[in-house]
Image: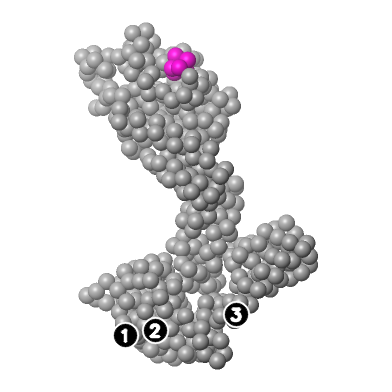
Amino acid sequence: MDSEGILKVYEAIIFDLDQTLIDTSALKKWRDERSWDECYNHLQLTSIYPHVQSLLQSLIVKKIAVVTNSPHVYASKLLEYHQIPYDHLVAYQKHGRNKPYPDQLMSCIEELKVEPAQCMYIGDDPNDIVAAKIAGFHAVGFCFGNLGLAEMIFHMPDGIVSNYHQLFHYVQKQDDVFFQDKLKGLYDHAMSAQQARDGKRYVKLLKDASNLGHGQAQYKLSKLLEKNPALVDREKDSDYYLWEAAKLMVAEAIYEIGYRYEIDNQTELAEPFLRTSANLGLPHAQFFFGKTKLKANDSSAKANVSHRWMKKSVTSGLEKGQSMLEQVSRIVAFEADLDNRLFFERGTSIYYLDSYLPEQRFEDFFSQEIIKIKDKEESGILYFLEQLESLLLKDIAICYVPSSDKENLDSGIRKIAQRLSTKQAIDATNCLVRYQSKEKSSLGGDRSIEAHMNTMLVENKGKIVGKHVLLLDDITTSGSALIASEQLLMQAGALHVTKLALGRTKS
């Protein structure tokens, strides 16, 4: 540490080039075409980002380098044109591995004679973050004006900045022990003021710590301003501080963003935020993410994935997750048993007992039994009851896919479901209802999931809310009827749906 208190933790600050040090978007067409002469002739169309030079001046005691996937001649001409000083340049390696591999970064620090832990790498692309983290560098995402911020968060850099003024304070916060102490002191005093119920002082200290880049202070301030919008200064409202905290990878802030999307039914937007905060170790994020995975429509292993996250949340100390973990554990064990005893179609996540052979339905024994179910014959019903009874789980809710004919309320598969429900299971056979007849798929009717969803609804929801549902069908071909039924049950509040058909059509 020198006489001014600068703790030189990072001996080298290394930058990406395009869209990090210099805005080269005007050259994109020529860069994509690899028309480098055109790039050289139009360097005047590029611009250095604001405050780059002043930042580099402040870093004069450190080693400065540039690592880019652009060609060496192009990079050196660009750096010279904008008079950017540097100690070493590593460009595209024709016969080596480039980012996202760490090779270029490792080559750079070998030349600079510094260790990975002493290096900070700043880049605008997720590949920059991947390479830096593999190399063992401190990885900083650069999202000018917050462009591409969400995607950058999902790649979990150590921090994100949106301009070079922020980067100056970010480096200062990492290196200057006095600055670190000041930030910690402001935040600690803010927490003391909160405990003393000194609201005015609490707000002032929280704002001071937030504006100097304290992530937890920014998150707490965002929550405070959400409840008290009158305290907002200019444009720095609750959302502003929430995203600033997320840029510093505060798990609570990232979870909050995901949760807001989730309650707005924007599950696709919510999922990566919830996953990221869970990966950052936030117990209630791990719990909530585990719950959302049970709702996924595209994963054959969703119960197993959910179980892993639920277990992590409980291991991390979330006591309220224990009950849900036990429920999901039973689901996982139930489906593991099915895996050992039944066939499984991975693309649709449907279990089935055997193949139905329409062309041999009068010769093949199993296919004959399926026909008996269609005809509601008692011998066929007894045959399949014997096959299914040993698979049952206590307190599981049993539903069935209703007939395409809304008037057919007493199908063979419903009879099976009702009789199984007497074996300590919940009779939920009056939950899924076909309110509008649909032409049978086997006769050329629409097989799409939408066609089924648009002709069915869920009644008596209390029987399936928060429950593990066993959903039965007699024959599945495309799986659309079972998938549509699953989605309707999940939308109505079911915890998880296990789809099981007696037979799967095999041509």
**Horizontal arrangement in the rendering, residue 360 relative to residue 340 (left or right):** left
Residue 464: image location, x then y, percent: 54, 28
Q: Nearer the viewer, mark 2 or mark 3?
A: 3
> Which residue bears the numbered disc 2?
65
Q: Quadrant of the C terminus?
A: top left
10 Å crowding of disc 3: few (<14), some (14-19), many (20+): some
The label number, if any, that marks residue 111 in the structure image: 1
Q: Amino acid at mark 1?
A: Glu
Of pointers 2 and 1, the one earlier in the residue sequence: 2
Q: Could you tell which of marks 2 and 3 lies nearer the N-terminus? A: 2
Check disc 3 and give the amino acid type: Phe
Residue displayed at 53% across by 86% down = 6
Which residues are the magenta region?
417-423
Magenta span includes 419: yes
Q: CA distance from mark 3 to mark 1?
A: 31 Å
Q: How is the image coloured?
A: one colour
Closer to the N terminus: mark 3 or mark 1?
1
Q: Quadrant of residue 376?
A: top left
Q: Which mark identifies residue 179? A: 3
Mark 2 surroundings: few (<14), some (14-19) or many (≥20) residues within 10 A = many
Q: Is residue 223 magenta?
A: no
- Cβ atoms under marks 2 and 1 closer than 8 Å: yes
User: Whole-percent x and y of residue 388?
Assistant: 36, 20
